[in-house]
Structures are given as C-alpha cells and as structure tokens.
Image (tube, helix red, strand yellow):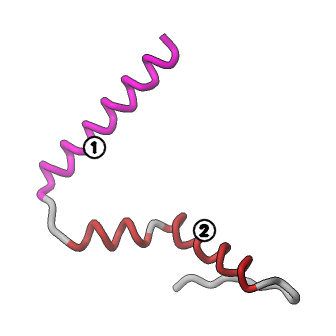
C-alpha cells in the first residue's frame, strides 16, 4: 500500500502527482504486467542479455 504524506494547504493535484511518482518508482505496474503472463526463465535471460548488449552498443557509440 502506498501512502502519501499531504501537508496542510497542499493541493490535491500535487498530492496526486506525488502518488503517481511513488507508484512509478516502486515498479508496481511493471510487476503487474510481468505477472500477467508466464515467461520462461530462458527467455527472461535472453531479454536481459539483449538489453545489456543494446546498452553497451549505445555507450560505445557515444564515447568511441
């Protein structure tokens, strides 16, 4: 459960923005989506490797 501390006189919009940021930082939506369907561990590892390779290529081309 996400709790957001709201100060006196703070607008509702600001409180909602705080909630959304906290929600995003905690990765709740990402976890819900990942649990929606089963992915095999081998496929999960493959995706992690693809991301790592992509990241390395990006940094290599940026710094050359």
- On the image, the x and y values in percent for residue 61 come to 44, 17
Mark 2–mark 1 contact, CB under 8 Å? no
Name the disc covering residue 11, or none: none
Marks 2 and 1, the one that precedes in the sequence:
2
Question: Where does the magenta region start and end?
Answer: 40-64
Q: Residue furthest bottom?
A: 8
Q: What element carries label 2?
A: helix
- At a point 15% along the width and 60% down the height, the residue shown is 39
Q: Does the magenta stretch include residue 30?
A: no
Dominant secondary-structure state across the stretch colored magenta: helix
Relative vertical location of residue 43 with respect to residue 28 in this rendering, above or below = above
Closest to the observer: 45 or 34? Answer: 34
Report the disc number at residue 48.
1
Q: Nearer the viewer, residue 58 or 5?
A: 58
Would residue 41 be found to the left or right of residue 52 on screen? left
- Which residue is under mark 2? 21
């Amino acid at each position: 459960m996400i709790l957001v501390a709201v100060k006196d006189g703070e607008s509702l919009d600001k409180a909602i923005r705080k909630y959304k940021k906290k929600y995003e930082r905690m990765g709740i939506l990402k976890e819900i989506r990942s649990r929606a369907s089963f992915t095999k561990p081998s496929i999960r590892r493959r995706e992690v490797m693809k991301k790592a390779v992509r990241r390395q290529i990006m940094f290599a081309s940026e710094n050359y």
